[in-house]
Amino acid sequence: ELTDVVLVLLFAQLLHAASYGALHAISVQYIQGFFGKHHHGQGQALYSGLT
């Protein structure tokens, strides 16, 4: 039934949003630690270019 499909799609979208948000937050924090204060912008640019 259409209602069941919509609920599955909604759940999948929410799961995707949560996992992407977590990965992004962890990646930004890793970049801050790896590149340091002086090269943070370059690290962020590299991350944006690769993703």
Image (spheres, helix red, strand yellow):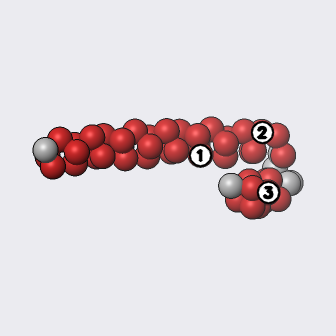
Sequence-wise first label, 1 or 2: 1
Residue 46 in view in this figure: yes
Find numbered disc 1 in the image and state the secondary structure of the residue it sits on: helix
Quadrant assignment, res 49: bottom right
Q: Nearer the viewer, mark 1 or mark 2?
A: 1
Vertical position of residue 9 compared to residue 46: above or below: above
**Mark 1 residue type:** His
In the rendering, at what x and y percent does residue 18 appear?
A: 44, 40
Residue 4 left/right relative to 12: left
**Mark 2 residue type:** Gly
In the rendering, at what x and y percent does residue 34 appear?
A: 82, 40
Please name the residue that numbered disc 3 is placed on. Answer: 46
Q: Nearer the viewer, residue 13 or 30?
A: 13
For the C terminus, the image quarter is bottom right
The CA span between labels 1 and 2 is 14 Å
Please name the residue that numbered disc 1 is placed on. Answer: 24
Q: Nearer the viewer, residue 15 or 47?
A: 15
Vertical position of residue 45 compared to residue 10: above or below: below
Residue 15 left/right relative to 25: left
Residue 12 left/right relative to 36: left
Which residue is at a point 17% across and 41% down the rendered structure image? 4
Find numbered disc 2 in the image and state the secondary structure of the residue it sits on: helix
The CA span between labels 1 and 3 is 14 Å
Please name the residue that numbered disc 2 is placed on. Answer: 33
Sequence-wise first label, 1 or 3: 1
Q: Residues within 10 Å of mark 1 (few under 14, many from 20)?
A: few
* Count of numbered badges drawn on the protein: 3
